[in-house]
Amino acid sequence: MVAPLRRNLLADQAADLLLRRLAAGEWEVGAKLPGETTLAAELGVGRSTVREALRMLAGQGLLRARQGAGVFVERTEPVRGDGWESVLRAESIAAVVEVRNAIEVEAARLAAGRADEDDELAMRRALDRRAVAFAEGDREFVDADIDVHRAVVVAAHNPVLTELFETFVPRLTEAMVEMVELLGVRDRDPDPDADEHRALVDAVVSGDAEAAVAISRAHLEAMLAAVRRLGR
């Protein structure tokens, strides 16, 4: 029995441990992996964590899910590019960006129809703070960037959406700090996304829901594309 995982980022670590077991020959090419319940018990994590780990490995061509049959081994070692650690990091960040897309695009749409003067003031202040934080450090910049998006979410005036976003912020922060480092975002001066953030706030303030949605979605899709290129 494999010892349970005890650190953070369990999906990443579960994928790494499964990769080690593949490389050690525990399962040959063509073999069917144990079910999610069995793997979850072996790794000491939940089934959703196992499912995400299997998705990561499938994304690298190591595994293939067959509808109604299970998950099978396609390869026992990844194609080496920038290294498995970079692949795992990119996969983890991409998953976070996908959730951002689900939350923030809808928040932008709602905020465009509900933002009041207090919301505008909060968004403008967050933009100003973000501009200053660009020169301060990765974590400071990420915190300030998230504050802009938080202000948009709050402007949607949906308490459930706000609670969902706040619950997500710790994971979001860690992923975005990693992304800023991996992509060298702060190496590009001036900030390449400053105008995009300002345009989002302008669209929300003007009540242009269509523009707010388009800007938010385009921003996150570009981010997702950049992150996925890291995992290739």
Image: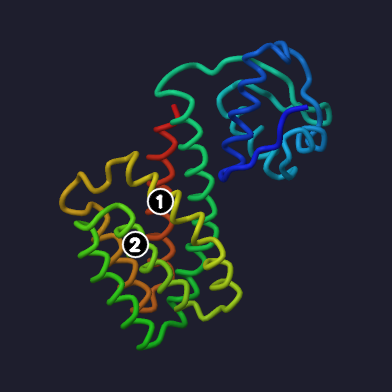
- On the image, the x and y values in percent for residue 104 come to 48, 63
Quarter of the figure with the C terminus:
top left
Q: Name the residue: 61% across, 31% down.
A: 15
Relative to 39, residue 118 above or below: below
- On the image, the x and y values in percent for residue 175 come to 45, 49
| SS assignment at label 2 | helix
- On the image, the x and y values in percent for residue 180 come to 33, 47
Identify the residue under disc 2: 145
User: Residue 32 sits in which quadrant?
Assistant: top right
User: Residue 95 sits in which quadrant?
Assistant: top right
From the viewer's perspective, is 33 left or right of 213? right
Relative to 73, residue 102 above or below: below
From the viewer's perspective, is 130 left or right of 3? left
Q: Name the residue: 41% across, 39% down.
A: 227
Q: Residues within 10 Å of mark 1 (few under 14, many from 20)?
A: many
Q: Name the residue: 26% across, 54% down.
A: 137
- On the image, the x and y values in percent for residue 108 come to 45, 69
Q: How is the image coloured?
A: rainbow
Label 2–label 1 contact, CB within 8 A: yes
Relative to 163, residue 43 above or below: above
From the viewer's perspective, is 61 left or right of 180? right
Q: Could you say which disc has been placed on residue 25 in the image?
A: none
Q: Earlier in the sequence, mark 2 or mark 1?
A: 2
Relative to 221, residue 158 above or below: below
* Front-lying residue, 39 or 148: 39
C-alpha separation, residue under disc 2 versus residue under disc 1:
9 Å
* Front-lying residue, 203 or 181: 181
Quarter of the figure with the N terminus:
top right
| SS assignment at label 1 | helix
Q: Amino acid at mark 2?
A: Asp
Q: Could you say which disc has been placed on residue 176 in the image?
A: 1
Q: Amino acid at mark 1?
A: Met
